[in-house]
Image (tube, rainbow, N blue to C red):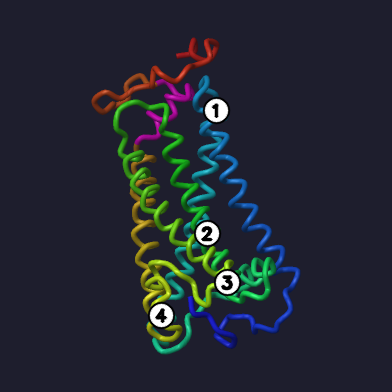
Amino acid sequence: MDHKPGTPGAHEMGDPVSAVDTAGALFFTGWAVAMWAAVAVLAYANRGPVRPWLYRTAVGLIGLGVVGQIGHFQEHVAQAIYWIANPYSPAWMTPWANSFAQGMGQVDTSKPALGMELLHLVGNLIFLAGLVGIVQITRRVSGELKSRKWARMGVWMQGIHGVEHLVLTVSVALGASRAIGLSTWFGAIEPGVALSTYRVWWHFVANLVGTAILGFAMLHLWREKRIVKAAYLLEPDNGLLHVTGEGIREDVPQEPVLASKK
């Protein structure tokens, strides 16, 4: 966004980076790295025998994704509210988001916008990992679960949104005078009120839709939780209401000892 020094809640360009800024940036980045490491572990381990820890890991992954997106979405809500109150002012970020951005911007202090772009990229990667977690936790259930359907929809949408942020970040990192992407009309919009307005509302709408999809996926996952848990042999599936063709996938191997508990 077209953030400028002196905007409410923002650091002045000459302000030194504090230890809190650095710690926050490292924490936020580590959060994203840990989530994608969990995604890789789940994707690999889910090809083998069923193990209860896979379920618990996926639950943790989803939980971190939900918490991350709540924080991410409130940032965009705050920016939209600020724009409504100050439509002709430069775009604004909350003090904590500015702190994270300031910390991340240390990778190249010659590019003032890079920290902000990195922050939004990391936030979207956290959201995407949470959606992938829903797809992973439902992988062992055959048939068409509504939670998996919504999560896949979210993965596609958030994947595209993530690519947008990747392009924005890379363009700034490579020295472009302004971020290049769909939300900047590929750099064709001059910095100022028009660019701030377009980008604030572009990302607000994208996150509003993405958060709604996540909400529906979580709602259906809650309703289908017994079926999902049964697929991990954590709960017997006797008496469960199954949709047509639904059950534990036979193409995913199960450990004989655990399978005997069914």
Q: Dot 4: what SS? A: helix
Furthest-right residue in view?
A: 19
Question: Is label 3 or label 1 in front?
Answer: 3
State whether residue 216 is above or below residue 134. below
Q: Residues within 10 Å of mark 1 (few under 14, many from 20)?
A: few
Q: Which residue is mark 2?
A: 123
Amino acid, disc 1: Ala
Query: Upstream in the sequence, badge 4 or badge 1?
Result: 1
Q: Which residues are magenta?
A: 224-236
Out of 162 and 30, give the one closest to the viewer: 162
Tell me, yes or no, whether the two marked residues, 2 and 1, touch with CB atoms within 8 Å.
no
Res. 195 mark: 4
**Residue visible at 58% across and 67% down in the picture:** 173
State whether residue 1 is above or below residue 68. below
Horizontal arrangement in the rendering, residue 215 relative to residue 169 (left or right): left
Q: Would you identify the image quadrant in which residue 182 lies?
A: bottom left
State whether residue 89 is above or below residue 81. below
Horizontal arrangement in the rendering, residue 111 relative to residue 170 (left or right): right
Indicate the position of residue 169 as horizontal and vertical percent values.
53, 65
Tell me, yes or no, whether the two marked residues, 3 and 2, touch with CB atoms within 8 Å.
no
Indicate the position of residue 175 as horizontal and vertical percent values.
57, 72
Q: Residues within 10 Å of mark 2 (few under 14, many from 20)?
A: many
Q: Dot 2: what SS? A: helix
Q: Which residue is mark 3?
A: 175
Q: Residues within 10 Å of mark 4 (few under 14, many from 20)?
A: many
Out of 199 and 167, give the one closest to the viewer: 167
Query: Upstream in the sequence, badge 4 or badge 3?
Result: 3
Q: Dot 3: what SS? A: loop
Tell me, yes or no, whether the two marked residues, 4 and 3, touch with CB atoms within 8 Å.
no
Residue 139 inside the magenta-drawn segment: no
Res. 45 mark: 1
Amino acid, disc 3: Gly
